[in-house]
Amino acid sequence: MTEPGKVPDKATGLTRILRAFGYTFDGLKATFKSEAAFRQELAACVILAPVALYYGPGGIAKAVMIGSLMLVLVVEIINSALESVVNRHGTEWNIHAKLAKDAGSAAVFVACCNVAIVWLLCLFF
């Protein structure tokens, strides 16, 4: 979107919104390229979202089922950002870096558990 190392001028109005959309797309593209887990989770969403639309017992259940899938993507993007910041700080082993990365991984795991719980409750209870 911008030249590497160059800070863009402050923008307002429509320009700011367009730039924000560009930064969003850059973030999605970078995460897709660099994170295999994100690509796998996105593929699962592409497969499971239509399943939710077909088998979900009602509109609210369908929305919650799809929302739980999207939450996994959101948490994975945040985890990827966290890992990127930790890696920028240095490559040597550090207990705080390990704790941060492990916490990000745990957050993704909890989001995946949430999918399982939501889908079981929506489909079978």
Image: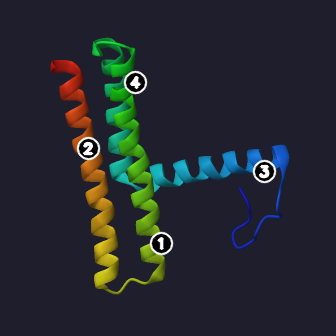
Residue 49 vs residue 47, the one in the foreground:
49
The answer to whether 69 is drawn above or below residue 10 in the figure is: above
**Other residues around mark 4 within 10 Å, as few (<14) / some (14–19) / many (≥20):** some
Pointer 1: what residue? 85
Q: Amino acid at mark 2?
A: Cys
Side (left or right) of 123 relative to 107: left
Pointer 4: what residue? 63
Disc 3 secondary structure class: helix
Q: Position of residue 125 (x, y in %)?
A: 16, 20
- Residue at 36 percent of width and 25 percent of height: 49
Image colouring: rainbow
Pointer 2: what residue? 112
**Other residues around mark 3 within 10 Å, as few (<14) / some (14–19) / many (≥20):** few
Q: Amino acid at mark 1?
A: Val
The circle drawn on residue 16 is 3
Of marks 2 and 4, the one in the foreground: 4
Q: Position of residue 18 (x, y in %)?
A: 75, 45
Marks 1/2 in contact by CB < 8 Å: the verdict is no
Q: Amino acid at mark 4?
A: Ala
Residue 74 vs residue 22, the one in the foreground:
74
Q: Amino acid at mark 3?
A: Arg
Side (left or right) of 114 relative to 86: left
